[in-house]
Amino acid sequence: MAADYYYPRYYQTRRYLDAGEQRALYLLWQFLSAEQRTSLERRGWFEVRGSRGGRWWLSLRGDVRRRRRWGKGYVGYCMELQGSIWYPPGDRLLALMLALRTNERGFRKEACRIG
């Protein structure tokens, strides 16, 4: 692990992270901008701009939210990743982030809208 890497507050409450979780967070960390890293560290979520300009919030708890066009509130989405039943949160966030950056319209078609 890089010396400048530290775990988000969400993980500081846990005593043990297995090697897979550590690698997943480290990989996610490499893809985030400095602003996104700061947001993830302080708030437990970060903002991603979709390929069509949408503003999305991804959190370590698994929440995926899209800001409404007029800035009032948000819409939640649920996306089930195929394959394994459980993914390390870092891998899940990276997959969702890349999906939004490359094909926001496809993401919205596949995801279940909540609210």
Image (cartoon, rainbow, N blue to C red):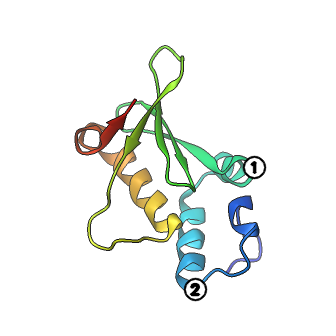
- Give the x, y percent position of residue 103: 29, 44
In the current view of this chain or complex, which residue is farthest to the bottom? 19
Q: Residues within 10 Å of mark 1 (few under 14, many from 20)?
A: few
Residue named by callout 2: 19
The label number, if any, that marks residue 57 in the structure image: none
In the current view of this chain or complex, which residue is farthest to the top? 70
Residue at point 52%, 82% (across, down)? 20
Residue at point 39%, 45% (across, down)? 101
Residue at point 32%, 61% (across, down)? 81
Q: Amino acid at mark 2?
A: Ala
- Give the x, y percent position of residue 105: 26, 36
In the current view of this chain or complex, which residue is farthest to the front? 115
Asked if residue 17 lies left or right of residue 105, the reply is right
Q: Earlier in the sequence, mark 1 or mark 2?
A: 2
Q: Is residue 5 above or below residue 112?
A: below
Q: Amino acid at mark 1?
A: Arg
Residue closest to the eye, 53 or 60? 60
Would you say residue 6 is visible in this rendering? no
Residue closest to the eye, 113 or 23? 113
Q: Quadrant of the N terminus?
A: bottom right
Q: Residues within 10 Å of mark 2 (few under 14, many from 20)?
A: few
What secondary structure is found at the residue carrying circle 1? helix
Asked if residue 44 lies left or right of residue 80, the reply is right
Residue closest to the eye, 45 or 97? 45
Number of numbered labels in the structure image: 2
Q: Is residue 98 above or below residue 13?
A: above
Residue named by callout 1: 42
- Give the x, y percent position of residue 5: 72, 70
